[in-house]
Amino acid sequence: MLAREVKILFRKELGQLLRNKGAMLTALFLPLLLMLIIPLAQVLAVNPDHPKELPIPPDVSLPPGLAEVGKDPLATVRLLLTPLISMGGLLTPALTASYIFISERESRTLELLVALPVRVGQILQAKLLAILALSAPVCLGLFAIVGGLMLSRGLGSPGYVVAMFIMVAASLAFSSSTALFVSLLARDIRTASNLNGLVLSPFLLGSFIVMAVVPGTTLASAVIAGGYLLGTAVVLLLALRVVTFERMLR
Amino acid sequence: MADPAVPPLEVTHVIKDYPGNVRALDRVSFRIASGERACLLGPNGAGKTTLIRLLTGALSPSYGQVRLFGLGMESESFLQARRRVGIVPQLPGMYRDLSVSDYLQLVKDLYGRGDIAEVVEVFGLGPYTRRPMAELSGGTQRRLSLAAALLGSPEVLLLDEPTVGLDPVSMRDVHAFLRRIMPGRTVLLCTHNLAEAEALCESAIILQQGRVVLHERISALRQRAPALLSIRAAQGPERLLAALAELGTPGRQEEEAVLVPTPEPTTQAPELLRRLLAAGVDVYECRVVTPSLEQLFLDIIGAADARA
């Protein structure tokens, strides 16, 4: 159960986020593009009854993750969608977090908050929850539309859609914890954006590599989800133990 | 029920280190008794704001204990103690997307009590309740900070440079509010304005380079410091200083006058004047000067520097 102070601060944070046009644009536009419009275009472009086979020469040896494409032409859609959708889950909270963490530090309003009867950890907890409260319904909701359409058109198994759903949730958790970590290090939004790119890029690239290396898109999605959850634990540990919240006040 | 023997503010052997081997506070210890109005003085970088942040629980000490009403920040009941403390932070930013009334409501919710209408009236915030905080003038922002600090009817006030950056009129208004709200409360006022400290507080804690060099009642400080004779001579302060040196009497030039420590001015001043006149120094002004807190502070800081 959430502490009383966290609930009060969460209401304040969410209210401010919803009133912030820049934050709302980031929270809605990016996932709309990455997790709905582009995936929908790909899903609707494929004819599941007469899928177009890829002309792969028989003597070409594909990595295990791409081998599925030779057997099932519809796998191409899954191979492209998986990293794209994980990208939406990674980027949305990270960008929204800049407004909620860094702007408070830049504008020195954090001084007002720490003068109130709350712990610094509660302030950060409320901010993290506000980020998730905004980005999770948007990202998971948009994916639910795409996932449902994929199921109805036979482009993915129920196991694949569930694995993807878990991957999106894990990417949100990872991105939010990374946003907290970056906000402890960066003093301004520009530095935060650069650091976000530095931290998230390897994972974005990694998701493509996993898709190529791990056989089966369902298993690959699960591996990516596992990687994000492990990353969440590591980043939170670094933020709490190594960097600590005191940096926010310097 | 609060234990009256427990001091509201207590700092015990606190060391605070920042990364890069920066020691902000070095074995600081003091306690502020209930009802005491203390000022925290020190040059820039002495550790005053770090101390205030430790008292609020925003920072934790590297070593030692900081307690509010006997409770450390690791205690589960620490927030209960925090709700008995009102804090005016130093030059905080103001929200662009929260109105004055939104912010006071947030403060009231966190303290769990408070009459917003009353503080709005007391601090003259009525015309501004719907305005975003960032659009207020500096003086009004400071009144808002004071209103927020008082909303929860705290027993303790921590004021970190409450008048810094204000014009004289706003400063006078804030001082008037402080004089009304401070009696009956335990106060720790962090300030550079020594006249303000002298007017509002009864005891002084002087910090220098992270250490407490003095914690004493201001009245006792004055009694320790000898009265000064301010002497002016027609030949100028340099000639006067030279004459005093010949008489074996130390003095310090201050603009066109020379200040001479004189523990017993009633008996010592006439004798000194006779000797100066006999030496050919044309003294035309001689008066007893009570050292100001600023002068006491500079003397103490200077002495601490010399010892270091």
Image (cartoon, coloured by chain):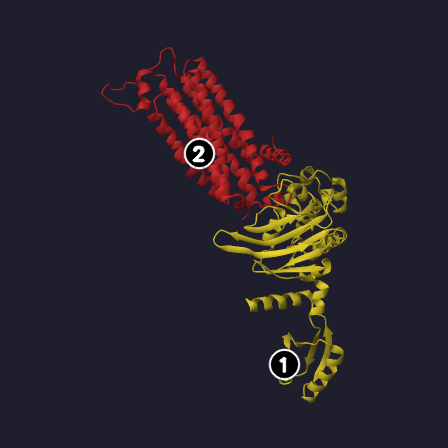
Chain colours: A red, B yellow
Judge whether B112 appears above or below B142 on screen: above
Q: Chain of mark 2?
A: A
| Mark 2 residue element | helix
Q: Closer to the camera, A234 or B291?
A: A234
Quarter-of-image position of residue B47: bottom right
Q: Which of the numbered marks, if any, corresponds to residue B241? A: 1
Would you say B297 lies left or right of A174 here? right
- Residue B163 visible, this angle: no
Quarter-of-image position of residue B257: bottom right
Q: How dense is the environment of label 1, judged by Cα within 10 Å: few (below 14), some, or many (20 and up)? A: many
Residue position marked by numbered label 2 in the rendering: A231
Q: Chain of mark 1?
A: B
Q: Amino acid at mark 1?
A: Leu
Residue at x-position 70% and y-position 72%: B226
Q: Amino acid at mark 2?
A: Gly
Judge whether B214 appears above or below A111 on screen: below
Tag nearer the camera, 1 or 2: 2
Q: Position of residue B62 (x, y in %)?
A: 54, 50
Q: Position of residue B196 (x, y in %)?
A: 70, 59
